[in-house]
Amino acid sequence: MSNLINISEAASLALHGLVLIAKNQPLRMNVKVLAEELNASQTHLAKVFQKLSKAGLVKSLRGPAGGFELNNLAEDITFLEIYEIIDGKVTLGACPFGKIHCVFQSCMFDNELNRISTDIYNTFKQIKLSDFSKKE
Amino acid sequence: MSNLINISEAASLALHGLVLIAKNQPLRMNVKVLAEELNASQTHLAKVFQKLSKAGLVKSLRGPAGGFELNNLAEDITFLEIYEIIDGKVTLGACPFGKIHCVFQSCMFDNELNRISTDIYNTFKQIKLSDFSKKE
DNA sequence: TCTATTTAGGTACTTAAATTCCGAAATAGG
DNA sequence: CCTATTTCGGAATTTAAGTACCTAAATAGA
Ligand code: FES
Ligand code: FES
């Protein structure tokens, strides 16, 4: 069983979690509630949000009534930026098969895969968190 | 560092190795030579070709002057089939984010990612091993 | 028939990534 | 203050991919 697009569970949690928080503004949400809503692992979600917090996307507040809320500028953040915070910076321009030394003059795929990678890239780049704020 | 398209080293070896063999027909090639040409791990390549052999794509011949050669029908094999033999069957039709329970009525990506997955799928499906036989 | 070569295939090892666990730190509310 | 709640962050665990190792089987060629 294989998935052609490369998205980690962690990245999925980040995107879904942030959208939930964006929708729920201005109220903050904590990990427990988020995990319940997403039907996902609480501990994993917590780790993911630590990264998002470090990256400045969310503000974290400890203690009772604590949780996470969006940082001021976070609304304009694109899905690409979120993805890259979690799964690492995307490298375009090289054949995804290029992990090994390629024997062929030009890539077997004639840049088809590059085209597709760029397509995913742009799709991720076009979607903003603000597209999901306070609407359904 | 992340790659948006999901291709294992093993799948890459399978594709590149088979194309080399297709080009080199009707002479067979052994693992050592293939690994040298691809500048890749001999043991890994061997394991990959065991799978391809089991799947019937190549015929293996042991002993001196042994190696691998394409099976009769292998020329018409698509890259998709090769990919699936190594990395597992591809499942289309669901949001790649769908590993977790999605809280949203309709996918955040409006089937954009489905469209792209299908795009990769079709690209892999259109390319045949025979496209690379005896030509450069 | 003997020997060197080469794949088969099982097991075990290594490495890296993903996930979980747990004690520490912060804080709101009583 | 004290306590319950909640995030923080390092450590440990799990999982998956890739790699190495070893013995067996096949076979070409001397
Ligand atoms: S780099 Fe070898 S096929 Fe693209
Ligand atoms: S299933 Fe949640 S975004 Fe597609």
Image: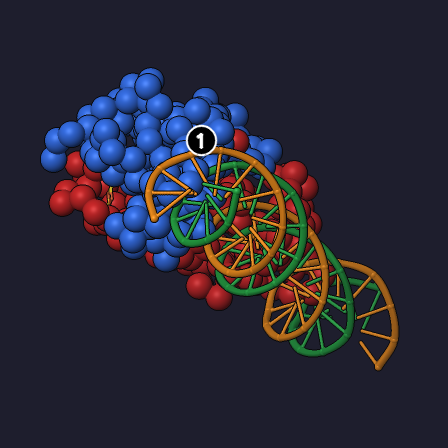
Chain colours: A red, B blue, C green, D orange
Image quadrant containing the N terminus of chain B: bottom left
Vertical position of residue B45 compared to residue B15: above or below: below
Q: Residue at x 17, y 36 (%)?
A: A110
Vertical position of residue B29 compared to residue C19: above or below: above
Q: How many marks?
A: 1
Give x and y (percent) for residue A20: 53, 42
The foreground one among A111 and A64 is A111
The foreground one among B72 and A59 is B72
Query: Is C17 on the left-hand or right-hand side of A104?
Result: right
Give x and y (percent) for residue A116: 26, 36
Query: Is B115 on the left-hand or right-hand side of B86?
Result: left
Give x and y (percent) for residue B16: 29, 40
Q: Residue at x 20, y 34 (%)?
A: B23
Q: Is any atom of residue B3 visible in this view?
A: no
Image quadrant containing the C terminus of chain B: top left
Tell me the subunit letter for badge 1.
B
Quarter of the render that holds ligand 1: top left
Query: Is A125 on the left-hand or right-hand side of B54?
Result: left
Amino acid residing under circle 1: Ser
